[in-house]
Image: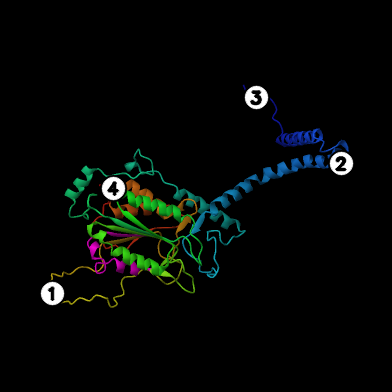
Amino acid sequence: MADKRPKEDPINKVKSIARNLLDNIFDDLMEKNVLNGAELQRLGDGVNLLVEGTENLAETLAKKSEMASKILMKRLFKQHLSLDSHSESENDESNSNELSSSSTESEDESEENRDEAKAGSAMALALPPSAPQEIQASEPNHELKLCSHDYFHRMRTTKADEIYPVMEQEGRTRLALIICNKKFTYLSHRDGSEVDLKGMKDLLENLGYSVVVKEDITALEMEAVLWEFAARPEHRSSDSTILVFMSHGTLEGICGTLHQKQKPDILHDDTIFQIFNNCNCPNLRDKPKVIIVQACRGKGNGATWVADSGGASAYRYDHTPQSYFSSDAVIKTHVEKDFIAFKSSTPHNISWRMDTYGSLFISQLIYHFKKYSWCYHLEEIFRKVQHSFENIEVLAQMPTIERVSMTRYFYLFPGI
C-alpha cells in the first residue's frame, strides 16, 4: 500500500537542520560561559537572518546544481586533457606549465559543449576497451596473452616463406629503446607521459626485449643515443628491434627538450631511418625494425609526406652487373628495408594525452598488443589500433602506418 504521509518540504527541512545546529552551538557556548544572556540576545537578530537566509540559499543551490555539476565535471576532465605539440602562437620564451585543449577559454556555449565532448571522448578512449568477441579471454586486461608452442611451430612450418624468422628465447638478445621527453625548457611539460613510459617498458619486457630507457634529452642527444644503440652487438643475435619515441612534435619530427620556435630542436625521421639502415646497422639487416612515435605532427601548411627526392646518396652503386661481385663477396642489398613506422596521428594533426591515463595512442597500443600479438602479425595489430580510433568523431586523432618496407609478416609470438 502506498505511503500516504505528506512529504516534508525540503526547504523547511534545511531550515530546521540549520536552526537545530545553531541552537546546539549556542547551548554549548552558554554552558562553557563563553557567551552570556545579553551577548546571545544581541546575536539573535543575526541568527534569525542566517536561518531565514538558508531558504534563499537552498533554493539558489537547487537551481544552480545542474550548472555547477557541469562546470565541475568539465574542469575535472579538461585539466587532464593535453596535446603533444607546442602551440604556434605561444611565447616560446616562457616556461608554460600547461598546454591543454582549454588553453584559450571562451564564454561561447557551443565551444564549451565541444570541450566537454572532447574530454568525455578522451576519457572513454583512454580506458581499456572491451575485448573483441572473437578473442575474449578469461585473464585480466593487464595480462599479455601468450602464444602456445604448438601454434608457433605450426606457423613457422606452414608460413616459413611469409613470416620473418623468430628466434626462441634461449640465446636470443632482443633489444628495445624508449626515448621519453617529459620536461622541456621552453615547452609545457608532458604530464602523464610517465604512465606511457611504464606501460611500454612493461609491455616490451614481457615481449622478450631488454629495454633501454632515455629521458629528457635534446635532439642531438637523441641522435647520439640512436647511434650507440644501433652499434650494440646484441643485435647480431636478435631477430628484431623496437624504437619508441614519446615527446612533443612537429610535422618535421620529434622535439628535443630545448625546442623553441626561434631555435628548433628536432630529431628528423630521416635521421632515425638512416642510422638503422643496412649500411649503418648491418646487425639488423633483414630483421624487422619497428618505430613507434607518440607526438603531435604540427599544424603547418603546405607540408606533407612525400617520396624520396632522389638527391645524391651517401652510398653510390655502379649499375653494371660486375659491380655487384668482388673478391670479398660483397652483395647488393637495399639501403632501407624491413622498417615500419606507426605514428600517433596523421600529418598536421594533434595527439591527445591525459595527465592521469597517459596518451590515448599508447594506451590503445598496449591494450591491442597484449590481446592480439599471440596470433596476429604486427601490421594487423596496428590496423586494430587504428580501428579503435575510427568512431571518435570529436578528437579526430587517427594513427598512421608509414614508411613500410617489410617484405614479410612480423609475428611477436609472446612466450616463445
Is disc 4 placed on a helix, strand or loop? loop
Q: Compute the Cα span from label 1 to label 2.
A: 110 Å
* Residue in the picture at 23% in, 60% down: 236
Mark 2 / mark 3, whichever is N-terminal: 3
Reply yes or no: does residue 331 show up in magenta.
no
Is disc 3 placed on a helix, strand or loop? loop
Mark 1 / mark 2, whichever is N-terminal: 2
Q: Compute the Cα span from label 2 to label 3.
A: 45 Å
User: Which amino acid is tagged 3?
Assistant: Asp
Rendering quarter of residue 65: top right
Q: Nearer the viewer, mark 1 or mark 2?
A: 2
Which residue is under mark 4?
Answer: 414
Reply yes or no: does residue 271 show up in magenta.
yes
Which residue is under mark 3?
Answer: 3
Mark 4 / mark 3, whichever is N-terminal: 3
Query: Going by the image, does 168 lie left or right of 201?
Result: left
User: Which amino acid is tagged 4?
Assistant: Pro
Q: Compute the Cα span from label 1 to label 4.
A: 43 Å
Which label belongs to residue 42? 2
The residue closer to the viewer here, 83 or 44, is 44
Q: Compute the Cα span from label 3 to label 1.
A: 99 Å
Q: How is the image coloured?
A: rainbow
> Does the CB distance between marks 1 and 2 fall below 8 Å?
no
Mark 2 / mark 4, whichever is N-terminal: 2
User: Which amino acid is tagged 1?
Assistant: Pro
Query: Does the image show residue 359?
Result: no
Q: Position of residue 330 (x, y in %)?
A: 15, 70
Query: Does the image show residue 58?
Result: yes
Q: Nearer the viewer, mark 2 or mark 3?
A: 2
